[in-house]
Image (spheres, rainbow, N blue to C red):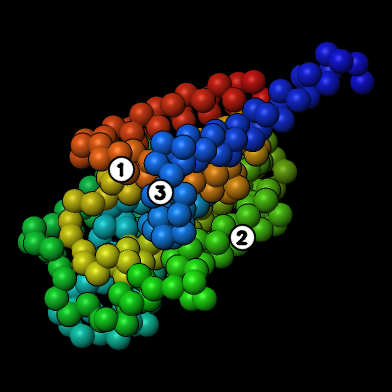
Amino acid sequence: MNNATRRVSAIGQVARFGVPIFTLALVMIFTVINPTTFLTVPNAQVVAASNSLALVLALGALVPLIAGEFDLSIGFNLELNAVISAVLLGQMGMSIPTVLLIVLCTGLIIGLLNGLLITQVGISSFIATLGIGSLAAAASIYLTGGAILIQGIPRGLVSFGQGSTVGIPNMVMIGVVALVVFWLILENLPFGRNLLAVGLSRKASELVGIRTRLMITASFAISGVIAALCGFLALSRVGAASSGIGTSYLLPALAACFLGATTVHIGRFNPLGTAFAVLLVAVGLNGLQLFGVPGWAEPAFNGGTLLVAVGASAIAARRR
């Protein structure tokens, strides 16, 4: 291997892990600027716990993206199921396992509706999921009446969402388990390989016997269930539910997916890249918040990150 080849290989490795390298650089910068607060165990626990939910939601959104489709309903799905959980637990007094089962079934129905509208009716995923998401948002407003639902939420549920086990936040454990499961399924099992094949070429996938419509519908079903689970977890984390929170979860999840496609497996949506991207966004936002930036900075950061992520992902895909 000559020097030129070695240089190209080295540049490729740096590009492959550009997101974690940039994250490490941000950590060093924020630590130097704010050494007494940023790189501390309490702050690290807060950042990890508060962003584990974003990781799980992003992993759910990742599945349709691998198949070449969008799910813009995930944030509103989360919102609706957080509200449903609050109503059933706080106002109707149902048990936690029963409510969790109802929520997961609701998410499954939303996901299947998305998948069937796309594969059977022929509506684009952008329009179908946006329409279903809008209906979910309307249902959330109807159920809450514009109020914040906080009464009657079981203390045990909130204690779990805000608590820790052996010093590790419970939400972090859930995020790690979700990452491992999605990595195993999407990177190592036939389902993940078939899903990737569908995303690369639907016609070629059909020629080799892959049932593309079933795969796409299944991808939206998984996304719907994960978004619903995140709604339940959001209630346990915050202890309250309200309408209008959908977009605040949607943009960071999509940004993480697209930014993740620029690392680990360049030009391809992948779980590990998504996890690194969630960490990068979390570190960036936390650093800005410690500087006391105004309220508009967070949505501006999320929107800017999404634009950069989509652009970088498109460039990486063309160069692959």
Position of the C terminus by quadrant? top right
Q: Secondary structure at mark 3?
A: loop
Dot 2 amino acid type: Val
Residue placed at 39% from the left, 41% from the top? 34
Q: Would you say 161 lies left or right of 179 here?
A: left
Where in the figure is residue 196, as x and y percent of width and height?
63, 43
Residue placed at 55% from the left, 61% from the top? 176
Task: Look at the picture and state if 4 lies above or below 130.
Answer: above
Q: Nearer the viewer, mark 1 or mark 3?
A: 3
Read off the residue under disc 2: 180
Dot 1 amino acid type: Gln
Mark earlier in primary sequence (2, 3):
3
Read off the residue under disc 1: 289
Position of the N terminus by quadrant? top right
Query: Dot 2 surroundings within 10 Å: few (below 14), some, or many (20 or more)?
Result: few
Instruction: Report the front residue among 260 and 165.
Output: 165
In the rendered image, is residue 61 in sight? no
Read off the residue under disc 3: 36
Mark earlier in primary sequence (2, 1):
2
| Residue 18, image quadrant | top right
